[in-house]
Image (spheres, rainbow, N blue to C red):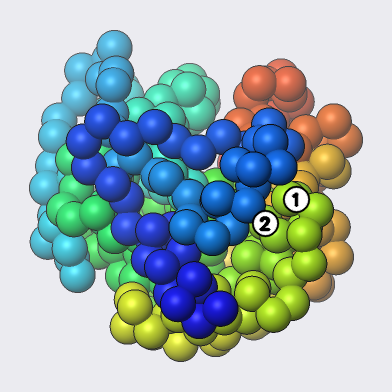
Amino acid sequence: MNIIAAFHSYKFTHFAAGNVTKTNNPDKLSVGQKVNTLLFGVSNPRPVNNVIPLAHFTTIRLKSNKEIECWSINTDSAKGTVVLFHGFGGQKSSMLDKAAIFRGLGYNTFLVDFMGSGGSEGNQTTIGYKEAEQVKTCFEYLTKQGEKKICLFGTSMGAVAIMKAIHDFQIKPEAIIIECPFGSMYKTVCARFRSMNVPAFPMAGLLVFWGGVENGFWAFGHNPTKYAKHISCPTLLLYGAKDEKVSKEETDAIFANLKGRKELKIYQEAGHENYLLKYKNEWTRDVEEFMHQF
């Protein structure tokens, strides 16, 4: 069981280069495919940016714990800058639709590839743990450029990385907008087992343990619910009521722990997905109302 867990956790936290087919969602797998996935792990091709911005942009490379690639897209008479961080298995081009909305609201946008994705270094991901330092690097870069009004936006893993960056490095953004952050590393791994209709115990715990060992951190301590206790800036927390990977209980616990001005918006028919697919108008309105408050 330990050997299986170690192999599975390595594949989950290290993207495969080359022509690799991504493993289907659990609900689309046959029984045999589910067994194969449980024994040998998922196949995750390295995320790539297949599209570039239509608007004029500048590519910027920053040295953090890994070298990361970013796109800076400016707008006239900007009110500030929104920094956008993608989720697990994503890349900065997946943030272009939301970046366009933020620019329409009058903000510059700064889109980031975490390590292992797009134009950034490596093939490793730590589900927001080491990515937190990359959030800090981007924030400090923009601060040194003279930007005084910085809002951090992140979805799923990106949201968790933002929360950990505030907890670990005491960065002080003007506000944050976070979509569907998980409550803890252990809980998000358990959710993936439940989505395949198989028991989480004991494999979820072994997977978390070996994932941490292989990536150089204590994964059981990766706990956004606790990170939230150190967040005092205005926060907009967004959640889909049909999210199969993050529970309402986790979301409520995070929201309760946030110390500053906070709002929770729930999209009843959304799962763990891009909310613009079903709720573009509502999402735009919620974000605009929140951003107008500061």
43 or 4: nearer the viewer: 4
Amino acid residing under circle 2: Arg
Query: Which residue is pictured at 17% across the width and 63% down the height?
Result: 66
186 to the left or right of 167: right
Q: Which residue is mark 2?
A: 192
Kindly identify which numbered label has been placed on residue 24. Answer: none
Query: Which residue is pictured at 59% across the width and 72% down the height?
Result: 185
Q: Position of residue 230 (x, y in %)?
A: 58, 81
Q: Secondary structure at mark 1?
A: helix
Q: Position of residue 294 (x, y in %)?
A: 58, 49
* Residue 44, above or below 24: below
How many residues crowd mark 2 within 10 Å: few (<14), some (14–19), many (20+)? some
Query: Which residue is pictured at 71% across the width and 42% down the height?
Result: 31
200 or 158: nearer the viewer: 200
The outermost residue toward the top is 54
Determine the CA span between mark 1 and mark 2. 5 Å
Q: Position of residue 237 (x, y in %)?
A: 69, 53
